[in-house]
Amino acid sequence: MRSRYTLAISGITLLVLFVGLLFAQNGNGEAPKLAFGSAQGASQVTASPGDTITLKLYLFIDNESGNRIAHIKLTETEVPDGWGLSFDPPTHTSDYNLSGIVTPIEENIYVEPKPVLPEKPTTNDAGTYYLSSPSGKGYLQAKAVDIIVKVPQDAQLGKTYNLRVGGVAAWYGEVGTVLFNQARDFDYKITVIQKTFSEQPMATNQQQPGNSTGIILAVVGLIVVGAAAYFLFFRKK
Amino acid sequence: MAKISKVVGSAIIFIGLISAVLASPSNNFFDIFNALFSTQTATASATVNAFVETSITNSTVTFGSLDPGSQNNTAASNPTQITNTVNSNTAIDIYLQATDLTSGGNSIPVANLKVAQTGSGTKTVMVEATANYLNGNSANNGYYENVAVGNSADFHFFLTVPNSQAAGVYSGTVTIKSVQDGQAPTI
């Protein structure tokens, strides 16, 4: 009797395992789609000499667009002389187990495919940013890289400086003659301003306010009007 | 006589009023007018962030087994499709680069890899990753131009194997650069 139970439980366990493996096989067997999504938090900003500012670069993969993890590496493509630029997370090498093979991959961040949520969650997952998709489908689940910019003390007031960051998304574990990368540029314009607002007129040929001659003439004009009115309408005939 | 006095008096009043207005500290009639009937404007600004998501349908290009000296072999995986997904809010220009195909110390030059927009279309030689982009390095010079949101672009790959090419499993990389329409790619 006991052996029958054991046999039945073993059979059920095997069946569950088989079905699970079947589903897993179907998941892995889905045709690969390599997606790379990005959104710049702000591409035109102001800063003052000596400031350190942080620009957000959001990275995402809608699981309807892609079904593989993208490894994204950023590079400084265009940085003005004397300016500092760094990334958080910084470029680093991590080991990944790709189908049983440990592979070192150089990246700043990796991005997994995630569904677009119909509503913004009330509680945030740490490190997840919810971006309203232009599609109107809902909220993309994004990760972010901080682009940290150090403005030099001698940056010219009023001048707009261009910065460009390059990003390359790579996918690993695929076998073929030609593999694909996706590359993208992220442009930023930073206008240098003073820390506090001030305004002073510079022109010298404008009329000064409170012109006393004008006031005197206005008073004289009004006196003339008053006198004329008196003689015209109130003086006894 | 009384009529003449009234006319002269009215004229003096008119001239006096005009003098007072013109001689006022602002010395500008329109300033006074504007002060009485002014409209103030405030500037409102909002920046809409650029979203770009692109998706490649085939993860690799596969040619299978080829013979040395064979010309323009069609990739078994053709076409590869790149979609500017609905999560984008801008049209894109697509630029291409590629590397040599290597196997150990042997290589097939990048110039032997060609791409076309259709199976029977014009085959264009790929360019080396560190030098240039296809079709060029300037703005609005992509291999595909102005791919709208939700639209796709097809890529057909062809490979010529040089005579006496050493046997081996060769592989390389194609980089697909999506550039916001109207911008130039960075080398």
Image: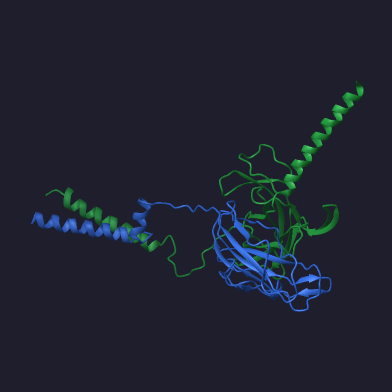
Residue A220, visible in the rendered structure: no
Q: From the top left corner, tell me how far across and down residue B37 is, in percent.
A: 35, 51
Which residue occupies the foreground of this view, A224 or A40? A40
Which residue occupies the foreground of this view, A106 or A55? A106
Quarter of the picture containing the N terminus of chain A is: top right
Which residue occupies the foreground of this view, B113 or B160? B160
On screen, residue B92 versus residue A223, left or right, reads right
Identify the residue at horizontal 74%, vertical 41% (top origin).
A23
Reply above or below: A212 against B135.
above
Reply above or below: B9 against B124.
above
Residue B112, visible in the rendered structure: yes
Identify the residue at horizontal 88%, vertical 24% (top origin).
A4
Q: Which chain is green?
A: A
Q: From the top left corner, tell me how far across and down residue B90 is, in percent.
A: 56, 57
Identify the residue at horizontal 86%, vertical 31% (top origin).
A10
Residue extending farthest to the bottom is B163
Q: From the top left corner, tell me how far across and down residue A198 is, in percent.
A: 57, 59
On screen, residue B62 versus residue A198, left or right, reads right
Q: In which image quadrant can residue A152 be found? A: bottom right
Indicate the colour of chain B. Answer: blue
Identify the residue at horizontal 73%, vertical 45% (top origin).
A27
Q: From the top left corner, tell me how far across and down residue B47 is, in percent.
A: 56, 54
On screen, residue B134 versus residue A202, left or right, reads right
